Image (cartoon, grey):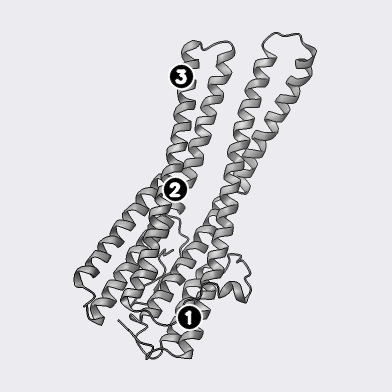
Amino acid sequence: MPESNERWSPAHDAALEHAWGEYRVWAATARRQKADLFAWRLRVLLLTVIGAVLGTLSYQLEHQGDDDRFWDVSVPTLGILAGITVGLATYFSREILSPGRERHWVRARSVAEALKSETFRFRTGIPPFHEPGAPETLLKRVDAIEEPARDVQRVALEGTGRRERLPAGPLSMDAYIAERVDDQIERFYIPRARQHETMLRRGRSITLFLGGAAVVLGVVGVTGWTTGWVAALATLVAAVGAYLHGGRYQYLVVSYQSTAAQLQTLKARWRVLGGGADKARGDELIQSFEDVISIENSAWMSKLLKDDAVSVPKVGAASGPETKPAT
């Protein structure tokens, strides 16, 4: 692996700055689209909960036989509000949480991850970036990665935003392990797996509680005031389940844990070598690291899009661009 700046030139700096700037743009685009999607999923969940509660309450008050004038006025209002909230939840689910918006988010993230991977391959000088024309090669590969996502609206970043955390110069194998592998394991895969596991556990606790309450009410009686609330609780269980499914939390926990384990195994292999591998062996290990990350991203994209035909190119170390998912 390169240990000096002998192979590095101002052209390398210029190409790296461009590639990194494009990565920053696509990463910002993906973050904004993800934030919007998850915020609207939460709003739809809340609207569904409110609609179910108001609808059931309206039904109960209407059939309880109370002559109180206050309830005579409130019951129609509750019914109207219930209809509005359920209608809004349905509308937002169809229009804002449509598969097309999710595809745009996935494609933006996949392009960002592919560009980031290319910058690390470029800085370590593994094939095809081991030849004098490496800067031109990087620019061509950036264009190839972005081409399938030209229809996605991007976030506009100023110069400072494009250069934020801009890396500098070539990377040795040890520096690559610290900057790329350790960062992915310790700051992304393991923390995100724990975060999603916590979300999944809380969601399951809520659904178990609501389901248990529905069972209890069902045992108490299937007529009278319990009937509406049993149905409402069933709706809430389904809504929470749909929210958890939309986030793919269970899949992501397993995927992130598995990827972190694979990266740790490869890192252990490097440590066994004692840092004494020749350049060819070092290049092979770097390619293995990037393949593990790329495979996880590809699997994530396929899962999220349910094998949708939309894809972005996967750019391998020694091969040309392929039209395969590679986030």
User: Could you say which disc has been placed on residue 195 in the image?
Assistant: 2
Disc with the residue nearer the chain's start (1 vs 3): 1
User: Could you say which disc has been placed on residue 16 in the image?
Assistant: 1
In the image, 294 versus 266, the foreground residue is 266
In the image, 228 versus 206, the foreground residue is 206
Disc with the residue nearer the chain's start (2 vs 1): 1
Q: Residue 69: image x %, image y %?
A: 80, 13
Q: Residue 4: image x %, image y %?
A: 35, 87
Q: Mark 3: few, some, or many residues within 10 Å (few <14, many ≥20)? A: some
Residue under pointer 3: 215
In the image, 118 versus 1, the foreground residue is 1
> In this picture, is 195 found above or below 56?
below
2 vs 1, front mark = 2
> In this picture, is 91 found above or below 116?
above
Task: Work out how far the residue at label 3 is from the one at label 2, CA to CA, in angstroms.
Answer: 30 Å
Task: Work out how far the residue at label 1 is from the one at label 3, CA to CA, in angstroms.
Answer: 60 Å
Where disc 1 sits, the SS reads helix
What's the residue type where badge 1 is placed? Leu
